[in-house]
Image (spheres, rainbow, N blue to C red):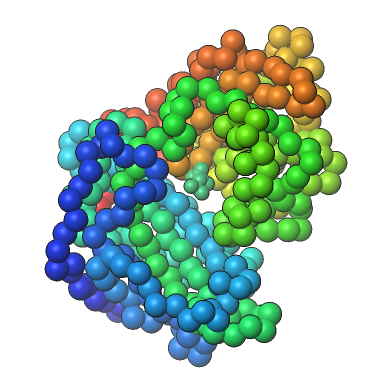
């Protein structure tokens, strides 16, 4: 029998900001989903509680060795009033893969799905209704055992928080300026680049700050071995359209298997476009720009969905993509995915779970 989820409702509810006041990840809803793990006992006591701070031992392993994973997905409110989660099973599958890589015990996928549906269901009034706004869902697992030896912890906490959000980048759908870095790398094959683990994001900050100081929104990472092949753009997967082919780096261990990446590749193939998962060197991008065949560049991710790249800068040289304007295919992809998310286009892939 499915394990019941205990629910303790918040005694007082917070006031909701207007959709127009929402940025990304600053406002949190009334409840949190929590579940504990202990070695020998497994995952136990799934519950929803009022949102609030956790008590955590100062020796908790996560605070010292960053043994933690997270994921990020969204719930949308359609014009019909229905609330839908976008590809929650795919996100759970990815979180469990991240967990395995970080020696964290995976969740029962069925219970994990119920945790998302139960929490979003209880806080459904928080799901924004205007286009470009959604409820961001952040499932996370952290190692809680108080122990300073370096080995997988024997105790964990799984929790889910919800945040009503607007655009991830202040630019919204306006093309962003990106600095190509070759002094720092995000990941190497054999490392943890394919896992959504907290340390990857901490490790990315220094290069991103340098780029910001130079007036760029984010960095384009190159591969960690040759410092030559495209890796990711900021926290997003990258895609380039050169001539009539769309290319994106293959999932060889360094690249995060993005759910939006997968959705975009699925749509492009259905539309009959030439798509290849292959290595793309920065030299190829520059040469294509010189030859006039670099048509569009964009990032894909849950937070921003699709983010057009308008400009790249590398070793002091700058290229402008599509005149710095959003490309036709970039816009078409954004519109198609958003239409599915808000329940306006039919969900032919079974990507939506109604809450
Ligand atoms: C995404 O959804 O694109 C991200 O990875 C960003 C998130 C870490 C805020």
Q: Taking 19 as reference, is 320 above or below it? A: above
Q: Residue at x 50, y 90 (%)?
A: 40
Compared across the picture, whether 151 is left or right of 6 comes to: right
Q: Taking 81 as reference, is 336 above or below it? A: above
- Picture coordinates of residue 328 (x, y %)? 50, 15
Q: Residue at x 71, y 32 (%)?
A: 180
Would you identify the image quadrant in which residue 123 lies?
bottom left
Q: Residue at x 18, y 36 (%)?
A: 80
- Picture coordinates of residue 273 (x, y %)? 58, 23
Give the quadrant of the N terminus: bottom left
Compared across the picture, whether 59 is left or right of 169 comes to: right
Q: Residue furthest front?
A: 213
Q: Taking 9 as reference, is 296 above or below it? A: above
Q: Residue furthest bottom?
A: 40
Q: Please state which of residues 25 and 75 is positioned toward the viewer in this rendering.
A: 25
Q: Is residue 274 visible?
A: no
- Picture coordinates of residue 353 (x, y %)? 32, 50
Please tell me how many numbered marks the rendered image carries: 0
- Picture coordinates of residue 277 (x, y %)? 68, 36
Q: Is residue 159 visible?
A: yes
Q: Residue at x 41, y 56 (%)?
A: 138
Compared across the picture, whether 123 is left or right of 216 comes to: left
Compared across the picture, whether 124 is left or right of 105 comes to: left
């Amino acid at each position: 029998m499915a394990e019941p989820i205990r629910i303790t409702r918040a005694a007082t509810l917070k006031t909701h900001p207007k959709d127009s006041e929402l940025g990304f990840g600053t406002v949190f809803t009334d409840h949190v989903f929590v579940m504990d793990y202990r070695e020998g006992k497994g995952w136990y006591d799934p519950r929803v509680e009022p949102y609030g701070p956790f008590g955590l031992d100062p020796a908790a392993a996560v605070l010292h060795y960053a043994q933690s994973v997270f994921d990020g997905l969204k719930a949308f409110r359609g014009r019909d009033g229905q609330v839908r989660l976008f590809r929650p099973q795919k996100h759970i599958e990815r979180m469990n893969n991240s967990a395995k890589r970080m020696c964290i015990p995976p969740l029962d996928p069925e219970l994990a799905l119920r945790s998302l549906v139960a929490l979003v269901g209880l806080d459904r009034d928080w799901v924004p209704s205007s286009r470009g706004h959604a409820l961001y869902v952040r499932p996370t697992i952290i190692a809680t055992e108080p122990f300073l030896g370096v080995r997988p912890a024997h105790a964990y906490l799984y929790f889910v928080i919800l945040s009503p959000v607007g655009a991830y980048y202040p630019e919204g759908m306006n093309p962003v300026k990106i600095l190509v870095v070759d002094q720092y790398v995000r990941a190497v094959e054999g490392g943890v680049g394919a896992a959504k683990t907290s340390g990857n994001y901490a490790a990315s900050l220094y290069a991103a700050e340098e780029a910001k100081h130079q007036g760029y929104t984010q960095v384009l990472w190159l591969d960690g071995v040759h410092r030559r092949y495209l890796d990711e753009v900021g926290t997003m997967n990258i895609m380039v359209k050169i001539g009539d082919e769309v290319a994106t780096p293959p999932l060889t261990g360094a690249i995060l298997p993005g759910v939006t990446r997968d959705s975009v590749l699925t749509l492009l193939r259905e539309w009959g476009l030439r798509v290849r998962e292959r290595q793309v060197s920065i030299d190829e991008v520059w040469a294509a720009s010189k030859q006039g065949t670099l048509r569009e560049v964009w990032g894909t991710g849950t937070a921003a969905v699709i983010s057009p790249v308008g400009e790249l800068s590398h070793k002091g040289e700058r290229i402008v993509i599509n005149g710095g304007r959003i490309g036709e295919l970039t816009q078409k992809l954004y519109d198609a995915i958003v239409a599915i998310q808000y329940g306006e286009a039919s969900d032919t892939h079974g990507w939506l779970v109604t809450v």
